[in-house]
Amino acid sequence: MVQVNIIILNKKIKWEAQNILLKTIYEDKYILVINKDVNLVVHPDINTNKNKKNTVFNGLLYYFPYLRDLPRAGIIHRLDKNTTGLMIIAKTMFVYFSLKRELKKHNIIREYEAIVHGTISQNNIINQPIKRLYKKNNIRMIISNDGKKAVTKYFVKNIFEKHTHLRIRLETGRTHQIRVHLLHINHNIIGDPIYKKNMNNNNFYNKIFKQIIQRQALHACYLKFIHPIYNIPIKLYSPLPNDIYKLLDFLEQNKILNKKY
């Protein structure tokens, strides 16, 4: 049995449907999976009244008006504004709560690719609780003993001269989890404007990085889950976007050049 908790707000909120390009990776009668672009917020913030327009949420209402009846227009999990990649959207209430339950049980596999500062030689697990910190209407997450459990697994794909290409699997799904955890182990993501160390010793790299990529080098590349209606495994992959691909190409060329000299 699925229990639904409904909160009635004192004020009526009218969300606008907008014709926003959503790149479909998979779709059937019950589920939609999109490949989210950079610089695209997932849904409005009803607490601060920010981002009321031009979000994935607004786009979903345009293409599927009936999603107004579902919590958060059926969005199962979110990505940060400047994180690209795969997102699941449910089209019915039953599928929404089924997928939410599977997500809570860690039965939906979500993997990312990231390029980080510093060299990492072996795979590992980060198991550090994360707490939400409110600062001048902005949210920042921090490692804290009284925070919520957060577990991130990372696997080394390639090691460059001073940077590393990682494949990452989320065991939990806290806000900014990957970014906070990687900062905690002193390997923050290239281009991250919030969770970063002082990188003054790498001015050469930083100048070039800013020309190649204007956001965190983080991409949600892989999803695996059991379809709640058809009971079949769904496996989906999204290739790296151009900015991250160009960043990897630069690091690889620089690695080859340094080996020669």
Image (cartoon, grey):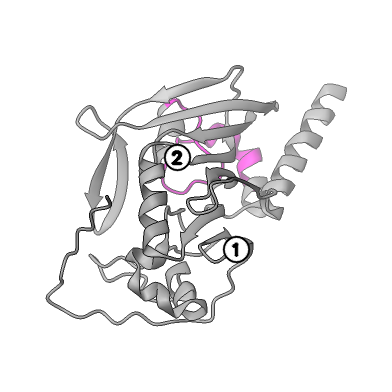
Query: Which residue extends farthest left?
Result: 10
Would you identify the image quadrant in which residue 133 lies?
A: top left
**Disc on res. 146:** none
| Front disc: 2 or 1 | 1
| Residue 85 location (% of width, % of height) | 58, 53
Disc 2 target residue: 179
The amino acid type of the residue labelled 1 equals Glu
Q: Measuring 39% from the left and 51% from the top, which residue is drawn there?
A: 98
Would you identify the image quadrant in which residue 256 lies?
A: top right
Is residue 54 at least partly visible in the picture?
no
**Disc on res. 27:** 1
Does the segment drawn in magenta span residue 195? Answer: yes
Q: Secondary structure at mark 1?
A: strand
| Residue 69 location (% of width, % of height) | 34, 73
| Residue 136 location (% of width, % of height) | 23, 57
Q: Which residues are magenta?
A: 185-207
- The one nearer the camera, 92 or 119, is 92
Label 1 packing within 10 angstroms: few (<14), some (14-19), many (20+): few
Q: How many marks?
A: 2
Query: Which residue extends farthest right?
Result: 260
| Residue 33 location (% of width, % of height) | 56, 58
* Figure check: 160 above or below 178: above
